[in-house]
Amino acid sequence: MSTDPREGGLAGGIKGLSTGAYDARIREREDRLAVLRQVQGELETERDDLEYTKAQRKQKVAAERARVRRMNRDIAALNRRVDSLSASANRNDQRVRTLRTRVPQIQSQSARLQSDLDALEGSGLGDSEADLRRAQLEQQRASLQAEYDLLNQMSLDLAR
Amino acid sequence: MTRHRTRGVRTLAFLAACAFAFKAGGAGVPLDEIRQVLREQALTTPAESLLHDLDAANLAGGLQAIDPAARYFPRALYRSPNQGRDAMSGIGAELLPSGDDLWLLPFQGGAAAAAGLTDRARLRTIDGRSIAGLSLDEIAQRLRGPAGTRVVIGIEDAAGGARRLKIERRSFRPLDVELVQPGAHRILRVREFVAGLTRPALLATVDFIEHAGAFQSEQHPIILDLRDATGGDLFEALDIAALFLPEGAQLATLAARGGVAKTIRAPAGTALEQPLILLIGPGTASAAEILAGILRDHGRARLVGQTTYGKCDSQTDVRLSDGSVLRFTDRAVRLPSGEHCSGVGIAPDLAVDTATLNDLSRLVPRAIGAIHER
């Protein structure tokens, strides 16, 4: 026999209530509600994790932008030093030629990294392509920094 | 194997087709300086008669007679190959003529990719009109447009399936190394070698994939797609080769005028040990085929595809006194085996037909199978 009070009119309904079937259905609904609340809690935790990850990514991009800005300033100073070296008696030195060729190139590449990071910060991040782009930019910045250090040392040696 | 010598000039579908030969206007070309630079620095000493015949009105032709790779750039038109790609606005794909077909090569992150073009496809129509009979320049012109505007293209994928794509043009900057995923495998695509940028981008991309849990076994080798890598900075390509080889491994020998040779070896540093597959084809040229040749000679990579373009010489750009630039061949590059691939190309370990070469979904399983044939 059905325990649904909607089946069998009022008498059936009263019968369903008196057999405790109605209580069982209330418990079942409460259990379902508890499961839904648990799922909702998990989703909220996941959302918080995503927000945290997103905030972390933003922090990383902001830190990277600061590093690139510093590097841009350093390269600009190196470029000025190379200009004065080029005007000196060393201008035919192979190392000066290397500096004159490569320093402007890393300057423009560094400026490109800067604009890419600016664009990345405005993109909202969070998708895998943005993550890949950020990973590439970080590695490229580190690589340019290492090259800048070598070129800077070369310019200092030449200036002595 | 039949070599594809009909490979056309590639152009960006959203930029002026600046790859076409420059016709010198004739005014103010420093011909004497060009002659002197070539006399002193070109790999092969040019005949004086050819130097004498250089003429501002047909400078491109005169230079070609001396050195097929030589080009002259007026100051305003010169763009350093080490600048990397600028941000672009458009459909986000390159045009590649091949035989009777015109292929669209989408950039990861570009509008065409966002509209669903994940791999190369033959372009058939633009806004409902057939492209038959149109010049490359006219086609590029129709595809170009400002960000936010739309174009509908009719394409046919490598397997022959035809469809229409509505693309909203937008601004983007191509990644220095793209990560494409035609199926279960992720493929790293390099289109050019930019000094100081491509190697770190490649390294970052490999790390990125490893963090995602790939490259655990021979079922997941690193697959490097060089099918459309037309070259770029030679030393960047050598640095990338060094990523996969032990310290001290011979990379290449650069031979300059008069037989002066310099051997380049892998420096200490990162050594990636995952199995490696390179996808190569007739569009793989210059620095890209040198990279392929080095890794093949060391037994470090399996080459899958078709014979490469066949240009294993290195060019240099010399800035002239008026700010214009002369590009010419100054070094021949020999692979570790002593081979010089100019005019010959690098043959694959596993050759595939053109239909397979153009279809990643078929090419990649063949390439994975090649790892087990070692």
Image: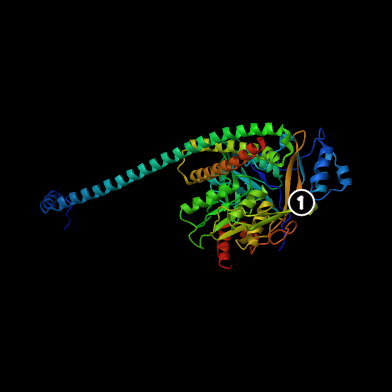
Percent across and percent down for residue B211 are 46, 52
Q: Chain of mark 1?
A: B
Query: In the figure, residue B35 lies in which quadrant?
Result: top right
Q: Nearer the viewer, residue B147 or B231?
A: B231
Identity, as a three-letter code, of the amino acid under mark 1: Ala
Point 60% across, 61% down: residue = B300
Q: Position of residue B74 (x, y in %)?
A: 75, 36
- State the residue at coordinates (83%, 49%): B45
Would residue B90 be seen by someone viewing this image from the given angle? no
In the picture, the quarter occupied by the N terminus of chain B is bottom right
Which residue appears at 69% of the width and 38% of the height? A96
* Secondary structure category for the residue under label 1: loop
Q: Taking A60 as reference, is B50 left or right?
A: right
Q: How is the image coloured?
A: rainbow
Residue marked by disc 1: B256
Q: Which residue is situated farthest in the front direction here?
A: A160
